[in-house]
Image (cartoon, rainbow, N blue to C red):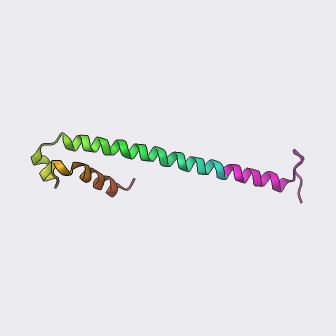
Amino acid sequence: MAVNSHASEPLSTASDRGHSLVAGLMHFGARAFGRVNSVVRSLQTARMVSTLSAMSDQQLAECGTSRADIRRHADTLMARDGR
């Protein structure tokens, strides 16, 4: 077994710890990104609902929706976007 000249523990143990640290950081980063992405999607959906709500009934009809279906329409558009 190779020995790390800078530490008293075997190189394989230090390497295993390094891999575990990297894996842990990657997992943390993925979870943090997922949360940020969820917040961004919620803000985008809220902005879309606000924009659609400001439209006239005629404009909404031209978009293929009605005032009662604004939330569902916004959710559908966000799902198509796939972000």
Query: Taking 31 as reference, is 41 left or right?
Result: left
The stretch in magenta equals: 1-22
Image location (x, y in percent) of residue 53 = 20, 42
Tell me if residue 69 is in the magenta stretch: no
Which residue is rendered at x = 32% and y = 52% of the image? 78
Image location (x, y in percent) of residue 72 = 25, 53
The furthest residue to the left: 58
Image location (x, y in percent) of residue 56 = 12, 43
Location of the N terminus (image quadrant): bottom right
Query: Taking 81 as reference, is 31 left or right?
Result: right
Marker count (numbered): 0
Query: Taking 3 as reference, is 68 left or right?
Result: left
Which residue is rendered at x = 43% and y = 47% of the image? 38
Tell me if residue 21 is in the magenta stretch: yes
Which residue is rendered at x = 51% and y = 47% of the image? 33
Query: Taking 4 as reference, is 19 left or right?
Result: left
Q: Nearer the viewer, residue 35 or 2?
A: 35
Which residue is rendered at x = 34% and y = 56% of the image? 79
Q: Quadrant of residue 80?
A: bottom left
The furthest residue to the bottom: 1
Image location (x, y in percent) of residue 65 = 17, 53
